[in-house]
Every structure is written in structure tokens, then in C-alpha cells.
Amino acid sequence: MYDYLIVGSGLTGAIFAREAMRHGKSVLVVDKRSHIGGNIYSQDINGIQVHTYGPHIFHTNTRRVWDYLNQFTEFNRFTNTPIANYKGEIYSLPFSMFTFNKIWGVITPDEARAKIEAQRREAGITEPRNLEEQAISLVGRDIYERLIKGYTEKQWGRPCSELPAFIIRRLPVRYTYDNNYFNALYQGVPVKGYTAMIEAMLEGVDVRLGCDYLAQRSELDGLAGKIIFTGQIDAYFGYELGTLEYRTLRFETEYLPDTSNFQGNAIVNYTDRDTPFTRCIEHRHFYPGLEVSGTVITREYSAEWQAGDEPYYPVNNERNNSMYEGYRKLAAERCPNVVFAGRLGGYKYYDMDVAALKALELTDEVFGK
Ligand code: FAD
Ligand code: UDP
């Protein structure tokens, strides 16, 4: 018997497990995948740390989270400066003076503001109601058409006019020549990879891999009094209120032995509608100065989630958010011994630092600070 059964060995499950152990509790972690780490899992391919489930750059303003994770890993100083390739033209991301200069030839922040203001006025947007209106009012129509529309419609499989505005507010808009993708005090990737970080957190913890909780529920429920469930909340309830929508991804990874620099940057977004993938990652650039030959690239394709696929991104529209609230109610009524946590349990687009902070706050609640 264990005090806690933790379903999912991602960042959320691993933090809960570590803290439960620290408070003298016994835990069993199960994961249906064949490895620990959930979506931040990384693997070594010919000396290069490859982010198996898409590029992961850690960034945070939360000192507590930074200090916490630094107990388990050292981070390097990688700063994310992705670029966009629109029909063979290269633009700087996020939207900064470099981008405005390339698009309009403007040099000063005032010139850029004037261009954007004029395009916003022409579109007649006062209160943006969706992603399209939000994007045009933030950066103008030219940038929307070239760098946002095609990429977003590939990524989400829906017109920008039907997507929530908050998705695009994730990206900074800067009137400076600073192309750091994140406004964060702390940023980097683990020097030895994310998997090593999670391994350090799970040291001494019992872990069963290749174990789907939903397929072995009665046996596993008998092993612990309390459950932390970081999988899909709708799957837990057998989809009884309906199926929440997600976007899934397909990753095409290739090792190229004959070049050590394929695209000159860690992340290149293809923002036109015709290129079928959204972005191409060259993993070695997360480790500037890496001294190995060859390179590994991954092209990322986005698609609507179907049963059996990995659910990467929740689709937070009104239908899904209200269905999710229904599931929360079911959880409160029927499952007093289960906590639904993490990105899937919360059905929210959490970055790693938010997932980590939520997990730490959950442990504060359960074990005290
Ligand atoms: P997960 O990592 O999803 O872990 C859940 C685990 O539960 C999985 O291992 C799963 O196999 C397991 N599980 C589910 N159901 C069951 C079941 N029935 N039985 C057993 N096990 C089960 N964040 C950043 O801060 N920076 C980034 O650059 C960044 N890039 C991202 C890129 C992509 C493509 C994606 C999808 C996410 C990105 N994120 C990024 C977010 C980051 O991945 C999450 O914040 C983090 O992985 C959340 O951890 P989690 O433990 O909550 O969920
Ligand atoms: N986005 C875009 N063009 C880009 C990059 C991002 O239009 O070149 C939009 C897209 O809608 C995406 C959102 O901005 O979903 C947030 O981007 P982010 O890089 O945060 O996405 P993630 O890290 O989730 O892949």
C-alpha cells in the first residue's frame, strides 16, 4: 500500500512525488508511456539532447520555481530567438523593431507605432473579440497576414476569427531591438536535458512505466488511498459529459550526419499556409558551442486530436471550457480522494513554470509549507 498513487510522471507528477517523499509519504508513480517526463522528455541522439515532444525552453519570473528546479538541474543560458520563414523571407520573432524594420523599413519606435496605429484604425477595431482582431490591433494587418494568420490556422485548425484572443497575447510585442521571445527573469534549458532533471526528482520513487491507469484502474485504486491524476479529465470519467477537444502533433525527426548546422537557429517557424509543417527545430542549437558533429532536426505537424492520439494542446473555447467545468463538478461530487492536476487535469495551456508552481502550491495545500 502507498499513501499516494500518482498518475503521470511529467513535471506535475514528478514534483508532487518528490514533495510527498520529502514529507515522509510513500508514493507510486505510473505512466502509460515507456519513459518518464511526460511532454518535457528529452533523449540523447548521437550526443545531442533532442526534445522528443516539441521544443521546450524553460522561462519564468517566479523565483520559487527557479530555485526549486535548480535543486535538480543546472540550466544553461539559452535564450529563445526564433525566426519566421514566410515564403523564403526571414523575419525576426517575437514582434520587435527588427520585424517592423523588415516589413516596413521603419527605423524608430515612433515610426513603427504610427504604422501599427494606422492599420488598427483602418481595421476599425476597438475591443478585440477574437485572435484575428487582437493580432491586428497589436501589430497591424501586414504582420498578421505574413506571420500570424497562416501559422495560427495550421496550428489550431480553425480560422483566427474563431480563436480566443489570449493565444496571441502569449507573444511579446516590443518597440525595441530585442528579439528575446520571453519576458522572463530566468531562462534556459537543463544542461543535461529534461529527462535527467525528472530522473533526479524521482530518485527513490517507485515508478511503473507502460502502465495505463484507466486500463488497470481497479488494481491500482487498491494500492493507495489517494490519487493525483495528471491525465485527461474527460477520459477519467469515460467521456460521460462529452469529449474535450485537443490539438495533437506529429513529429518527423531526422539525423543528418553530414552537417552540423542545418538552419542556423534552434527554431524556424514556417508562417505561410502552404508549408504543411508549422516549425522546424534544430536541437543542437539549444546548446550553443556543442562539440559534436551531425545534427538532428524535427518538423512539427499539427492536427485535430482523435482518440488514441497524444493530447498536446487543450482547445480553450466556450464549448470546451464549459464541458470542463462540468467535469470539475463531477470530480468534486464523486471523487473526494482524487486530485486532478497538471496541464491535462486542468485543461489549460500551462507553460512549465506555471505547471511547476501549481504543483508546488498543491503540495503546500496537502502537506503544509
Ligand atoms: P504532461 O507532461 O502531459 O504529463 C502527463 C503525463 O501523464 C504523461 O506522461 C502521460 O503519459 C501521463 N498519463 C496520461 N494519462 C495517463 C493514464 N491514463 N495512465 C498513466 N499515465 C497517464 N512550456 C514551457 O514552459 N516552454 C516551452 O517552450 C514549452 N513548449 C511546449 C511545446 C509543446 C509542443 C507542448 C505540447 C508543450 C510545451 N510546453 C512548454 C508546456 C509543457 O510541456 C507543460 O507545461 C508540461 O509538460 C506540463 O507537465 P504535466 O506533468 O502537467 O503534463
Ligand atoms: N504564433 C504565430 N506565429 C508564430 C508563432 C506563434 O501566429 O510565428 C501564434 C500561434 O497562434 C501560437 C501562439 O502565437 O499558437 C502562441 O505561440 P507560442 O510560441 O507561445 O506557442 P507554443 O509555445 O505553444 O507552441
Image: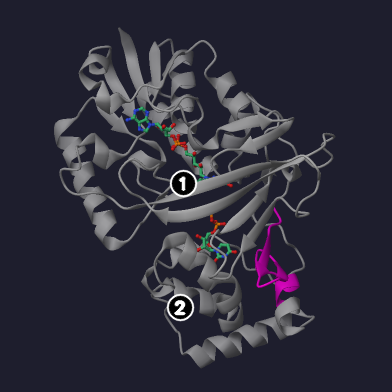
In the visual, does 18 lie left or right of 320? right
Q: Which residues are magenta?
A: 80-100
Q: Which residue is mark 1?
A: 350
Image position of 161 with respect to 363: above or below: below
Residues under labels 2 and 1: Cα distance? 24 Å
Q: Is residue 245 magenta?
A: no
Quadrant location of the N terminus in the rendered image: top left
- Residue at x-position 47% and y-position 13%: 205
Q: Position of residue 291 (x, y in %)?
A: 85, 34
Crowd band around label 1 with a 10 angstrom C-alpha radius: few (<14), some (14–19), many (20+): some
Looking at the image, residue 5 sits to the left or right of residue 113; the answer is: left
For label 2, being within 8 Å of ligand 2 is answered no
Tell me which corner region of the image, top left, top right, bottom left or bottom right, holds residue 51.
top right
The disc, 2 or 1, on the residue closer to the chain's N-terminal end is 2
Q: Nearer the viewer, residue 282 or 103?
A: 282
Q: Amino acid at mark 2?
A: Glu
Give the residue number, with chain letter if any, for mark 2: 133
Query: Residue 123's x, y, as percent?
Result: 49, 89
Mark 2 lies on a secondary structure that is helix
For residue 337, above or below residue 155: above
Three-letter amino acid code at disc 1?
A: Tyr
Q: Secondary structure at mark 1?
A: loop
